Amino acid sequence: MAVPKNKTSKQRKAMRRSAVWRLDTPNLSACPKCGELRRPHTVCRACGFYNGRDVLQLEAASKKKK
Ligand SMILES: [Zn+2]
């Protein structure tokens, strides 16, 4: 089994875990209904609109079916 030759310093560990490695932001596109930014292929969190219909409002109307 490979064993680390040197101790990883606090600074080096912090550098490895820092956010500079995850600078990419998620893709965002405007909702066609309300214009709110949302991630592609997801229901709009502002108005519940997805794929040409109000998905979340339909779920609220018929609570028995989940
Ligand atoms: Zn929307």
Image (tube, helix red, strand yellow):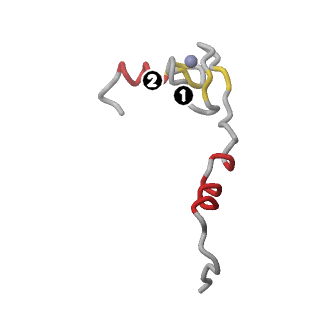
Residue 56 has which mark?
Answer: 2
Query: Percent x, y for residue 27?
Result: 68, 34
Q: Which amino acid does label 1 sit on?
A: Val
Mark 2: secondary structure: helix
Q: In which quarter of the image is the N terminus?
A: bottom right
- Left or right, residue 20 beside residue 13: right
Residue drawn at x 48%, y 24% as measured from the top left: 55
Residue 44 position within the rendered picture, expressed as x and y whole percent measured from the top left: 55, 24
| Residue 13 figure quarter | bottom right
49 versus 14 height, above or below:
above
Residue type beneath disc 2: Leu
User: Can you name the residue that lies furthest to the top here?
Assistant: 34
Q: What element carries label 1?
A: loop
Mark on residue 25? none
Q: In which quarter of the image is the C terminus?
A: top left
23 w.r.t. 42: above or below: below
Alpha-carbon neighbours of circle 2 within 10 Å: few (<14), some, or many (≥20)? some
Q: Where is residue 8 in the image (x, y as percent from the top left)?
A: 60, 69
Q: Which residue is drawn at the image coordinates 59% and 56% (left, top)?
A: 14
Q: Do the residues labelled 2 and 1 touch (CB within 8 Å)?
A: yes
- From the viewer's perspective, tell me whether residue 61 is left or right of residue 34: left
In-front residue for pair 45/64: 45
Report the disc number at residue 43: 1
Q: What is the C-alpha distance between the residues marked 2 and 1?
A: 8 Å
Task: State the residue at coordinates (60%, 66%).
Answer: 9
- The extreme bottom residue here reads 1
| Percent x, y of residue 19 | 63, 46
